[in-house]
């Protein structure tokens, strides 16, 4: 089947087929000498654009057919593109001349300029004058071409509206059929002459060149339509059912796109090969060239309609069906779609034959009426099928609700939502009503247009639905953490799985937007606005002016690429600093964090500046932007700026660093991370306290571990006055010496704090290597003190509560006296 990396090509090729067609009418083929225009100088291209505009203006006075107006509009747009391309080439040359002239400096009136420099300045000024004139002339030509194209499009729209609103005769009117009967013999004679001309051309070509080329073309066409197409379909089915196919929804949507591509491309290419083999021996007379092109185009469109129905409906394999419909509806809708495809092929080809044979207008009107009524019948049959499907769903939901047991608490299954069915039925009924009323009243052009556009819009909507689902499945599968591409990306860049999934969703959104835009363009071609859309695309491609700066889509794309590359490079450098270089410097953890953090933010700033330079935004404009932002910083971003500057101060001066034990207010804990906005402190219960950096700079903070500070343990207690304090002092020193966490230097100290009330208050101090060990070591010393005091008969006295009692009668109870 298809290779996975070629999935997007399938989408693009199918939509190019859509856009190449537009409505259900054949398009004229325009020939352009692109190579000559690309090899010419910018001045010659501007002159050629001027001559093309003059030719368009001369031809516009005699142009009346919509096809001619469309060709003239496209020629005007091509002239605009040529002029814009020439200006784009000349503008950098003008900038280079300005830079060279700036190197010469200004002309001083008091000092005469050297003769060589004066000659060089004069030559540069002359070149600049010519370039500036050419650029202005090119911009003027581009603007004239744009205005002329818009004027032609307005004329086309007006003619289109007049054609749809023209009353040509009702099919119920006997007068129409009488005129048709009168003109029928002459029309048949014209068609017979047309056929004889085609046969004569084929006979002459075969007599001159033989049957080898036509037979070879017919053989290749049959080979492509039947064996090759069927083999590729079976190959797709085998791959989709195998274990090599990607799991999930992509298996179904990918198969549907493959079937659509094969079913559309091979019949159209077969028709192209057949007509090409006839053209190779000049078997197609000039009068039949348009019919041959229409034959190829009609084959592509009809094959697209049939292939789209097959890929979406899957009448024989319900488990692979993308639309939520049952088997009877799928089979009937597929037959109707094939009927619509055949009717489209016959209609487009017969109308082109009528135009080439120059049959009478009444025959064309009668043909349009029959085609419109046939389309209406197909739409009505489709509506009947959708109505029956809706009824079957409603009946199934009612049966499931009756079978549910309310006593057991079972809920009946919810009926499948069919909002698209309601919309399809509503649009179909409105189309049928409008087409029938218009046909009865005699507006056959409008009836045919409404019916054809309903079929075409349905096909475009279904194609966009299929391709958007495929792009969504492909994007999510491609960037899934478990896919081959996702694993490779994670191992090579270290990106988190959540980031990969976000990238997949973002890619899916971008592809969806692009497909919707292409679908809108495909639908609007039938309304005669294709050239206007092309003009808007040219305007967008040439750039949009924002605040005096011209922003082009290509510049935006490259700026985004540069930004992503810069950020990736920053991440690689920071990872190298953290893992390779900084551990070998002997710096502590806090210093390494400061260096890596500053390097990261410096790299981000340089990446942003690099991206802005790619957009063409210079540093002088950044200075203006910074001055404008300073007003906003002064009003609304003051706190953020203060925290940012405080973070830089913390990273530079390092009053606190990672690993320090600090106390701020009534909270204390270990510093785990310092960023440019805030500092994270892990407190005793393992929760994280996020402190703005400005708090650490402007307020008093106690750093318990700064400069390798020791931890001091203080123990206070009281003993009776009769206690042997000398022996007690020796006991305490032995307890301190017996604990391996207590330092010998500074030595532990035992003091008598006071003697009062028959008690001796003792105050003892000991030191440990870190403040973090104070609490645990103090607890161990207290345990040892209680054990040794009990063993040596030393009484530890606790404070005594003193209650003051008054003499005299007790106060009377409340409520008495």
Image: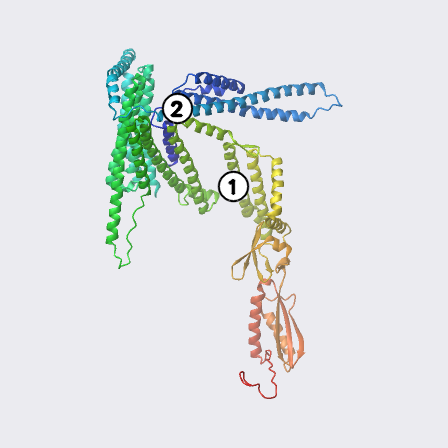
Q: Is residue 47 visible?
A: yes
- Tag 2: Cα neighbours inside 10 Å, few (<14), some, or many (≥20)? some
Circle 1: element type: helix
- Residue 711 located left or right of residue 482: right
Question: Which residue was labeled with disc 2?
Answer: 159
Residue 373, above or below 248:
above
Name the quadrant containing residue 753: bottom right
The N terminus lies in quadrant: top left
| Residue at image location 57% in from the left, 47% down from the top | 597
- Residue 797 located left or right of residue 309: right
Residue 622's x, y, as percent? 60, 38
| Residue at image location 26% in from the left, 52% down from the top | 401
Q: Nearer the viewer, residue 800 or 622?
A: 622
The C terminus lies in quadrant: bottom right
Name the quadrant containing residue 360: top left
CA–CA distance in space, label 2 to label 1: 56 Å
Depth check, mark 2 against mark 1: the one in front is 2
User: Which numbered disc, 2 or 1, marks the residue that appears first in the sequence?
Assistant: 2
Question: Which residue was labeled with disc 1?
Answer: 568
């Amino acid at each position: 089947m298809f290779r996975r990396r070629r999935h997007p090509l399938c989408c693009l090729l199918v939509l190019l087929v859509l856009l190449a067609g537009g409505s259900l009418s054949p398009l004229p083929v325009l020939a352009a000498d692109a190579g000559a225009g690309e090899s010419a100088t910018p001045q010659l291209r501007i002159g050629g654009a001027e001559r093309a505009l003059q030719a368009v203006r001369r031809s516009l006075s005699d142009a009346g057919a919509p096809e001619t107006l469309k060709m003239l509009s496209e020629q005007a747009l091509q002239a605009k593109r040529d002029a814009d391309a020439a200006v784009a080439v000349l503008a950098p040359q003008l900038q280079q001349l300005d830079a060279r002239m700036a190197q010469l400096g200004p002309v001083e009136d008091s000092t005469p300029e050297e003769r060589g420099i004066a000659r060089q300045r004069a030559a540069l000024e002359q070149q600049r004058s010519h370039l500036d004139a050419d650029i202005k002339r090119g911009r003027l030509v581009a603007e004239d071409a744009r205005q002329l194209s818009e004027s032609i499009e307005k004329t086309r729209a007006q003619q289109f509206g007049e054609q749809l609103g023209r009353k040509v005769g009702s099919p119920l009117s006997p007068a129409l059929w009488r005129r048709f009967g009168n003109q029928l013999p002459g029309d048949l004679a014209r068609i017979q002459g047309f056929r004889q001309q085609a046969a004569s051309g084929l006979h002459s070509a075969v007599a001159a060149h033989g049957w080898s080329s036509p037979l070879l073309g017919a053989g290749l066409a049959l080979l492509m339509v039947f064996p090759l197409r069927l083999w590729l379909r079976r190959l797709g089915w085998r791959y989709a059912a195998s274990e090599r196919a990607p799991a999930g929804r992509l298996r179904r949507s990918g198969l549907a796109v493959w079937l659509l591509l094969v079913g559309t491309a091979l019949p159209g290419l077969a028709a192209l090969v057949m007509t090409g083999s006839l053209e190779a021996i000049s078997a197609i007379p000039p009068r039949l060239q348009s019919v041959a092109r229409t034959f190829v185009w009609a084959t592509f469109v009809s094959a697209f309609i049939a292939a789209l129905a097959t890929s979406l409906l899957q009448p024989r394999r319900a488990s692979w069906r993308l639309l939520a419909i049952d088997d009877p509806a799928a089979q009937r809708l597929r037959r109707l779609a094939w009927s619509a495809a055949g009717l489209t092929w016959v209609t487009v080809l017969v109308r082109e034959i009528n135009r080439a044979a120059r049959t009478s207008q009444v025959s064309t009107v009668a043909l349009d009426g029959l085609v419109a009524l046939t389309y209406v019948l197909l739409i009505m049959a489709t509506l009947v099928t959708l109505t029956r499907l809706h009824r079957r769903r409603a009946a199934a939901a009612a049966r499931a609700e009756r079978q549910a047991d309310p006593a057991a608490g079972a809920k009946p299954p919810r009926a499948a939502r069919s909002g698209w069915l309601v919309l399809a039925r509503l649009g179909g009924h409105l189309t049928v009503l409008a087409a029938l009323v218009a046909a009865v009243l005699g507006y056959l052009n409008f009836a045919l247009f409404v019916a054809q556009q309903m079929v075409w819009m349905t096909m475009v909507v279904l194609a966009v639905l299929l391709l958007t689902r495929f792009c969504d499945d492909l994007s999510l599968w491609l960037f899934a953490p478990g896919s081959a591409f996702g694993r490779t990306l994670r191992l090579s860049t270290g990106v988190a799985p959540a980031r990969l999934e976000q990238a997949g969703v973002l890619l899916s959104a971008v592809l969806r937007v692009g497909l919707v835009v292409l679908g809108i363009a495909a639908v609007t071609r039938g309304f005669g606005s294709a050239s206007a859309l092309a003009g808007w695309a040219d305007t967008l491609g040439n750039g949009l002016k924002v605040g005096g700066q011209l922003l082009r889509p290509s510049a935006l794309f490259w700026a985004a690429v540069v930004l992503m590359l810069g950020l990736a490079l920053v991440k690689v450098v920071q990872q190298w600093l953290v893992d390779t270089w900084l551990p070998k410097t002997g710096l502590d953890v806090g210093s390494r964090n400061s260096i890596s953090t500053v390097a990261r933010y410096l790299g981000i700033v340089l990446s942003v500046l690099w991206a802005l330079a790619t957009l063409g935004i210079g540093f002088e404009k950044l200075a203006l932007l910074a001055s404008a932002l300073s007003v906003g910083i002064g009003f609304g971003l003051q706190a953020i700026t203060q925290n940012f500057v405080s973070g830089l101060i913390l990273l530079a001066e390092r009053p606190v660093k990672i690993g320090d034990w600090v106390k701020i207010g009534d909270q204390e804990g270990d510093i785990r991370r310092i960023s440019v906005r805030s500092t994270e402190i892990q407190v005793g219960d393992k929760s994280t306290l996020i402190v703005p950096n400005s708090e650490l700079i402007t307020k008093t903070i106690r750093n318990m571990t700064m400069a390798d500070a020791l931890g001091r343990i203080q123990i206070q207690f009281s003993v009776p006055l009769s206690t042997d304090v000398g022996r007690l002092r020796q006991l305490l020193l032995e307890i301190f010496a017996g604990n391996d966490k207590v330092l010998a230097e500074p030595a532990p100290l035992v003091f008598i704090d006071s003697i009062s009330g028959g008690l001796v208050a003792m105050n003892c101090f000991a030191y440990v290597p870190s403040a973090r060990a104070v609490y645990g070591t103090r607890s161990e010393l207290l345990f040892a003190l209680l054990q040794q005091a009990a063993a040596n008969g030393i009484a530890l006295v606790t404070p005594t509560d003193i209650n003051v009692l008054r003499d005299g009668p007790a106060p009377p109870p409340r409520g008495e006296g």
